[in-house]
Image (cartoon, rainbow, N blue to C red):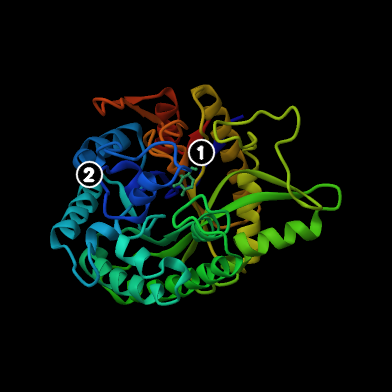
Amino acid sequence: MSVTFPDGFIWGTATAAHQVEGGNWNNDWWEWEHTSDRVREPSGDACDQYNRYEEDLDLLAGFGFNAYRFSIEWARIEPEEGEFSRVALDHYRRVCAACHERNLTPIVTFHHFSSPRWVAARGGWASAATAELFERYVTRASGHLGDLIGRACTINEPSMVATGGYLSGVFPPGQRDRDARHRANATFIDAHRRAVEVIRSGPGDAPVGICLAMSDYQAVDGGESYLERIRAGMEDVFLDALAGDDFVGVQCYSRTRVGPSGALRPEEGVETTQMGYEFWPESLEATIRRAYDRSGGVPVVVTENGIGTDDDTRRVEYTRRALQGVRRCLDDGIDVGGYVHWTLLDNFEWAEGYRPTFGLVAVDRETFERRPKPSATWLGTIARTGVMD
Ligand code: NOJ
């Protein structure tokens, strides 16, 4: 049975600067890639999108999408504290303009995991003062780009940066310190609130929101209280701080089963992806519902959803089932404004390097040649027609 989506629905793909641009040597991730044994390989030239963005936008528009979510790199825009680069800002102006020329709405993320080295040296996100530094950067960047921004995402998955960087130690700065993790969550919330104000008071009228990492948490054998504890620090602390935002970006990949003493491994017999996650596309529906309820009805945009797999037919199946869930949410009156797929290109998957392939388009690691996969045409056709057969 075919499924239809509303007119005006946002159909896009997402990327992040550090994962696709290449040569982002001035941020904390680059340093981490060269000092930590927890990263599989360095990002290097990534997908050279810094130079090839026009080719990528041509592809995206050609497939049938109407939006592109990308991030701007703080370390390029403010390479040293208080020193702003006009050249970097102009580059991102050109990227935004190139989106408009192709009828793609630029969805701009101001912080996607990476921070300038000088910010890290000043204590990073565990330091409350970073919220003010972020506010100053956002003021400058939105002042320069705001009239061209179609939708603004302040911060991408703050819970992952706070937890990966300060609790599990797999992201920079590799700490394992419960207090630092709590402080980082609080700094992110402060930074988000400041950024919303600044973006709204600058040029343009883009809707503003934050993008949250969510999971379909499921309690197993008495895991309810542990589940609540995990979810409080990963999701609720942020969902409870969004009143008045224009939208919340929901980003979901799988479910998380939680037993009485913590998160459990994938259930026996359930297919897993390259990331080791369970193949669980229905998790998107569950998290949209939860984000909407818990935030008190803030409109939802799916700002990421996708799968790391080398079998493109599984990508199509995963996305089809995820979109069926989006449709059920719409049927129940939940305000879901769009679906942005992670990701356009096979790219640098952080600690996992280039091994996981989430892209609708493969990238030759030597020549950077783009090779669209069948899923790109499949999803682009849904984007163009609003109908999924
Ligand atoms: C979440 C992050 O925002 C993105 O950077 C990452 O690559 C994907 N999910 C896939 O893990």
Q: Position of residue 308 (x, y in %)?
A: 51, 33
**Which residue corresponds to the image point at 35% horizontal and 35% vertical from the top-left?**
64
Residue 167 percent coordinates (x, y): 57, 59
Number of other residues with Cα within 10 Å of mark 2, as a class: few under 14, some 14 to 19, many 20 or more = some
Question: Mark 2 belongs to which amino acid?
Answer: Tyr
Indicate whether 378 appears above or below 300. above
Residue found at the very far left of the displayed protein? 87
Three-letter amino acid code at the position of disc 1: Gly
Tell me: 228 left or right of 289. right
Disc 1 residue: CB within 8 Å of ligand 1: yes
Identify which residue, 262 or 12, lies in the foreground: 262
Residue at image coords 66%, 44%: 255
Q: Residue at x 55, y 72 (%)?
A: 241
Q: Position of residue 222 (x, y in %)?
A: 86, 53
Q: Which of marks 1 and 2 is nearer the N terminus?
A: 2
Q: In which quadrant of the rendered image does the N terminus lie?
A: top right
Instruction: Please give the residue where the numbered disc 1 appears in the rendered image.
Output: 306
Report the number of numbered marks: 2
Can you tell which mark lies on residue 50? 2
Q: Where is residue 386 in the image (x, y as percent from the top left)?
A: 46, 39
SS at badge 1: loop
Q: Is residue 370 left or right of residue 40?
A: left
Tell me if 215 is positioned left or right of 348 in this view.
Answer: right
Q: Callout 1: few (<14), some (14-19), or many (20+) C-alpha neighbours within 10 Å? A: many
Q: Nearer the viewer, mark 1 or mark 2?
A: 2
Q: Residue 175 shows which numbered tag? A: none
In front of the other: 131 or 201:
131
- Toward the viewer: 24 or 294? 24
Asked if one can make out residue 67 in the rendered structure from this viewpoint, the answer is: no
